[in-house]
Image (spheres, grey):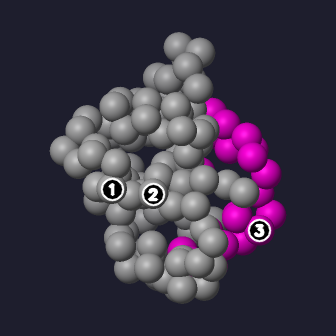
Amino acid sequence: MLKFLADENFDNTIVRGLFRRNPTLDITRVQDVGLSGKDDPTVLEWAAQEGRILLTHDVATITRYAYDRVKEGQPMPGVIEISTDAPIGQVIEDVLVLVECGQDGELEGQVQYLPW
């Protein structure tokens, strides 16, 4: 099963909706692992060490740091960037489809955008 890390700025309404629909999801929040206030490279490093795909609304800086990791040959399990104005129900559906259809390692080195 895919594992996720919800960025500090990630909408908790989406996280709660995901758990309501699928209580077995493996989602950890940045706040729950002592990464609140840490910079993007630190968050991406932790996600890589744990094999977690980062869920974020941060389209301004995360992309650059994620691709820097790829260029440097460092692991980067994937980033899913979600527009802040995307309908919450659609985001939940899209993430659940990814969970149902995705395979471990499939997003390695990639940045994907939701909604599709």
To which residue does mark 1 refer?
32
**Residue at image x 47%, y 52%?**
5
Task: Give me the C-alpha separation between circle 1 and circle 2.
Answer: 7 Å
Under tag 1, what secondary structure? helix
**Residue 2 coordinates in the image, percent (x, y):** 67, 55
Q: Quadrant of the C terminus?
A: bottom right
User: Which marked residue is nearer to the observer: mark 3 or mark 1?
Assistant: 1
Picture quarter containing residue 71?
top right
**Residue 37 coordinates in the image, percent (x, y):** 19, 44
User: Which marked residue is nearer to the observer: mark 2 or mark 3?
Assistant: 2
Q: Is residue 102 left or right of residue 53?
A: right
To which residue does mark 3 refer?
100
Badge 2 density bin: few <14, some 14–19, many ≥20, Cα 10 Å: some
To which residue does mark 2 refer?
28
Do the residues bearing badges 1 and 2 touch, measured as CB atoms within 8 Å? yes
**Residue at image x 53%, y 14%?**
72
Task: Give me the C-alpha separation between circle 3 and circle 1.
Answer: 25 Å
Precedes in sequence: disc 3 or disc 1: 1
**Residue 56 coordinates in the image, percent (x, y):** 41, 55
The type of residue carrying mark 1 is Asp
